[in-house]
Image: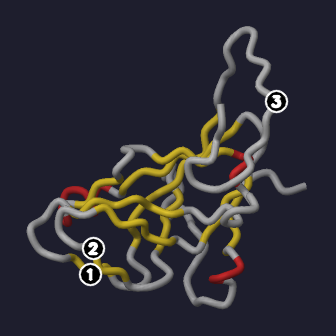
Amino acid sequence: MRQRGFVKVSAYKDADFPLPERKTKFSAGYDFCLPEAVTLEPGKITLVPTGIKAYMQPGEFLGLHIRSSMAVKKGLLLVNSVGIIDADYYDNPENEGHILLALLNTKEEALTLPKGERVAQGIFYNFLLADGDEAQALRSGGIGSTKS
């Protein structure tokens, strides 16, 4: 049985780029490489495709973090600081669970990131529930689709 991992979304299934991977034995994060070059305009938020979806167990989520080299050297921010990918985001009907990075270019000039650039890293986490939590609803769409 599959526990947790990554798969290319159908729109990128034939694209030549690696699935997220850890680079060292003690790394926590799985590096996400860009499946295509992207240009980020100064001061603008850009939704950058990763070509990836993530599967995991109930009680887990994938936290997305900007790589420190992207933040420090290139002035990129992940707009929501930490992206949270819930287990039920995988294969949702709106976008197949495609993980997009909401990046902000803080520099005063456009920045082009080449195909294959390692931009973000994903870390799988466990989470706890509060007493009395009885949530039963399931996701019905993509980004920002959780309904109350």
Question: At x 80% / y 51%, what residue is drawn?
Answer: 3
The residue lying toward the viewer, choosing from 116 and 46, is 46
Name the disc covering residue 112, or none: 1
Which numbered mark, 3 or 1, is in the foreground of this view?
Answer: 3
Query: SS at mark 1?
Result: strand
Q: Earlier in the sequence, mark 3 or mark 1?
A: 1
The quadrant the C terminus occupies is top right
Q: Earlier in the sequence, mark 1 or mark 2?
A: 2
Outermost residue to the left: 108
Outermost residue to the top: 131
The residue lying toward the viewer, choosing from 72 and 89, is 89
Name the disc covering residue 136, or none: 3
Mark 3 surroundings within 10 Å by alpha-carbon count, few (fewer than 14), some (14 through 19), many (20 or more): few
Query: SS at mark 2?
Result: strand
Looking at the image, residue 111 sits to the left or right of residue 137; the answer is left
Query: SS at mark 3?
Result: loop
Q: How far apart in space, not on screen, are marks 3 and 1 (Cα)?
A: 43 Å
Q: Position of residue 95 (x, y in %)?
A: 66, 66
Question: At x 69% / y 20%, what residue is drawn?
Answer: 129
Mark 1 surroundings within 10 Å by alpha-carbon count, few (fewer than 14), some (14 through 19), many (20 or more): few
Looking at the image, residue 141 sits to the left or right of residue 44; the answer is right
Looking at the image, residue 124 sits to the left or right of residue 67; the answer is right
Looking at the image, residue 88 sits to the left or right of residue 83; the answer is right
Q: Are marks 1 and 2 in contact (CB under 8 Å)?
A: yes
**Occupied quadrant, residue 18:** bottom right
Q: In the image, what residue type sits under mark 3? A: Gln
Residue for badge 2? 40
Q: How many marks?
A: 3
Q: Are marks 3 and 1 in contact (CB under 8 Å)?
A: no
Q: In the image, what residue type sits under mark 2? A: Leu
Question: At x 50% / y 81%, what residue is drawn?
Answer: 35
Q: Earlier in the sequence, mark 2 or mark 3?
A: 2
